[in-house]
Amino acid sequence: MKIAIASGKGGAGKTSVAASLARVWESPLVAVDTDAEAPNLHLFLPPSIEESRTSWLRVPGLDKEKCISCEKCRDICTYKAIASFAGRISIFPEMCHGCGGCFAVCPTDAITEGRRELGTLESGTVLEGSVRFLMGRTRIGESMTPPLLRQEHKALDAMLESAPADALLDSPPGVSCPAVTVTRDADMILLVADPTPFGFHDFKLAHQAFKPLNKPVCAVINRAGAEGNEEGDEAVRSYCRENGLPLLAELPFERAAAEQYASGRLLADLSPEWRERFIALRDALRAEYARLKEAAHA
């Protein structure tokens, strides 16, 4: 079971939820940070890194002597990484998404193979070696995250094939390409709702953006019960009821929790009450997943 823990905006609390769920999971697990542009799961789950490798993307170059300027490479490139100026082909490797179409259509083998560094993939363990860990980190200056995320997904699949486990994916915030790339490969999406006006607005956007993926989606309210925000909490609850979105937990707004988070410590370690909240959320996720599997086979 792969669970993507997502949010409509940054700061909703998905990383702290993911880290505390990892603490209480109690079965084979891989904790994955897929927010490659700004990874921070390692701040809550300090890892023992066992392997770090550079991730590369195959990009085109050009052998000008072989090029006949047929422009087939330009025509197939959706992302405009290949252009033609006055009948001459020009290639912009930084815009390439690595689909490989230009290599396939060139009739003279004028497209040569190059590569662009995307970033790094790091793997190891966390929580005293009890949980495996995987993290992607983009190269400074790299503008495209999805190619690295696809390679991270392949690395995760290899880890799960070698030793079956569940996976908690700390997703990129928002609903742009990186978030969709991650959630598309998940079995279930847990949306963390920030019940403020802006947070609720982005929560609804995220739900609508992920619906076309046809993935089971459930929700948790973070920082519920803040004084004077009863209307915000109820807005999230009402939306979930109206849209058939299972609301699995409400994590309360507490000063002690904010201090725990600010110091980089796990909410599940704050008190027995907080640990029980995450155990209940864990059990609710498992029960919801089992219910959906049973319904699918009915």
Image (cartoon, helix red, strand yellow):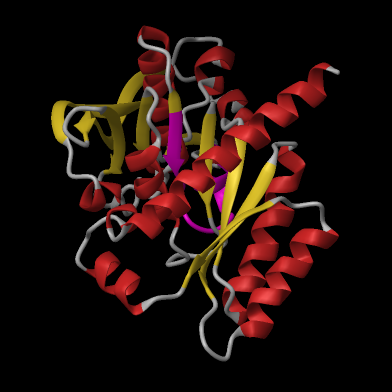
**Could you say which quadrant of the image residue 93 lies in?**
top left
Q: Determine whether 205 is above or below 170 in the image.
A: below
Q: Which residues are magenta?
A: 167-181
Q: Nearer the viewer, residue 78 or 52?
A: 52
Screen quadrant of the C terminus: top right
Locate residue 217 relative to residue 180 in the image: left or right: right
**Could you say which quadrant of the image residue 65 lies in?**
top left
Which residue appears at 62% of the width and 81% of the height?
197
Q: Determine whether 162 is above or below 16 in the image.
A: above
Locate residue 162 relative to residue 175 in the image: left or right: left
- Give how far across and how far down residue 239 sits, in percent: 77, 65
- Give how far across and how far down residue 57 sits, in percent: 36, 28
Q: Is residue 121 visible?
A: yes
The mark total stands at 0
Which residue appears at 45% of the width and 75% of the height?
253
Which residue appears at 49% of the width and 39% of the height?
81
Q: Determine whether 37 is above or below 90 in the image.
A: below
Q: Nearer the viewer, residue 147 or 233?
A: 233
